[in-house]
Image (tube, grey):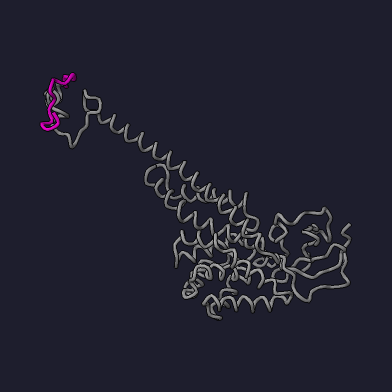
Amino acid sequence: NAEQGRFFQEDTYAGTATDPLTQNRYAYVKNSPLNYTDPSGHKIPSLGEIISSVENKRQELIGRLDDYIWDKVGGGIKEMMNTAQELSRTVDCGLETAVYNILLGAGFAVIDNMILQPETLMLELLNPSWDASDSKRFRQEIEDWVIENGVTDTTYFYLGQLISDALQVIITAQQILKIIKNLGPALARLSAILSGGGGGLQLAAAGVGAYALDAGISAGTASALVDAVGLIGAGVAIAFMDVSGIGYDADKFVEALTEGNAETDIPNYIKENRVPLDKETVLKGQDYQKTGKKIKGAQIYKKGNQYYYRDTFHIGESAHLEVFDKRGKHLGEADPLTGILKPGTADPTKMIDVK
C-alpha cells in the first residue's frame, strides 16, 4: 500500500534477531524509506552491498569518461588537422608550414582548454588513484601524439597555442574554433602581403602594418606584435583579430601573448648561437625531399624546382638556407624557419650540381 507504506501481506523476509525493526513483516524498510531502499523486495541491502554498488557505478562512470575523453579529443584533433591542412593550401610564398602548424597549435589549445583540462579534473574527483600529476601526464601524452603524428614545425605549433590562449583572454574557445574555420580569405590576403610582390621583407612588413590598421590595430601595437612573434606570426595573429573583430582589444591580446610567450618562440639554435639542425628548420616539412647529396656536410633538399641546404658557416640569428634553381643557379639566402628568400642575397658565383 503506497499511501500507508505497508505491505498488504507479510514480507517473505523474516528479519533478524539483532535488528527488531526488521521483524515487522508488514513494514517497508524499517519504516524509513528516505534512508533505505528494498530493490529485491526481501531485505535492505547490507552496507557492504551498498558500497559495492556505488563503487561499481563509479568505476563504470570513470570508464565512460575515459572513453569520452579519447573519442572527443581524437575526433577534435583529426578535425583540426584536416582544417589546418585545407587552409594551409590557400597560401603560398613559403607560408604553408607556418600556417598549418600555427592553426594546429591554436586548435589543440582550444581542445586542451575545452575538453582535456575539465575532463581530467573530473577524473581526479572520481578516482582516488588519479591526481594532478596523472592529468598533466595524460595531457602531455596526447600533445606528444599530436606532435609526432601531425606537427611539422614545433616552433609554429607552440606559437599557435600562445595565440589561442591569448585570444581566450578576450573571446571564448568556441568562438576561436569558428574563427579558424573562417580564416581562408584573411590568410589569402596575408599570403599576398608577405609575398610582397617581389619587393622583399620591407614591403611585406609595411603590408602587415597596413593590414593591422585596417583591422583596427594601432601601428605601435602591430610593431610590438612583430617584435614578440616575428613577421609571419604577427601576420597570422592579425588575421585572427581581423576575422574575430577584436582589433579594439589588440593591446590586451598582445599583452596576454607576450606574457605567455617568454622565449618559447625563439629557436634553440638562436638561443645557443649555433648552426641549426635540419629538424629545426623548414627542411623538416613534408614538402622538402632529401636528394641524398650533401654540401659541406649539409643534406640537400628539393622542393618543387628548387634546392635547399643549411649554410654551415653562419650561426644564431645569421643562420640561413642556401637556395638554388633547377639548373643549380643560386637564388639567394632564405629564412631557416620559413624558407622565404631574402632580397638581394643571390650570388652569381655560387653554383651546385643538381644532377
Whether residue 105 is situated above or below residue 266 in the rendered picture: above
Taking 216 as reference, is 270 left or right? right
Foreground residue among 222 and 296: 222
Could you tell me residue 222's position as x and y percent?
56, 77
The part of the image, by quadrant, that contains residue 304 is bottom right
Magenta: main secondary structure: loop
**Residue at image point 18% right, 37% down:** 34
Q: Please give the name of the residue rendered at 74% of the width and 68% of the height, measured from the top-left corner.
A: 334
Residue 8: in magenta span: yes
State the image coordinates of residue 58 (x, y, percent, origin top left): 36, 38
Q: Nearer the viewer, residue 196 or 334?
A: 196
Between 225 and 171, the one lying in front of the other is 171
Q: Does residue 7 lie above or below 282 as drawn?
A: above
User: Which residue of the protein is positioned furthest toward the front in this rendering?
Assistant: 185
Residue 104 in percent (x, y) is at 58, 57
Quadrant of the rendered image containing residue 128: top left
**157 with respect to 286 (left or right):** left
| Image quarter of the C terminus | bottom right
Q: Residue furthest bottom?
A: 219
Queried whether the magenta region covers residue 128, the answer comes back as: no
Q: Residue 292: x percent and y percent?
A: 82, 53
Q: Start and end of the magenta stretch?
A: 1-15
Judged left or right of residue 164, residue 118 is left
Instruction: Give 309 or 273, whichever is nearer the viewer.
Output: 309
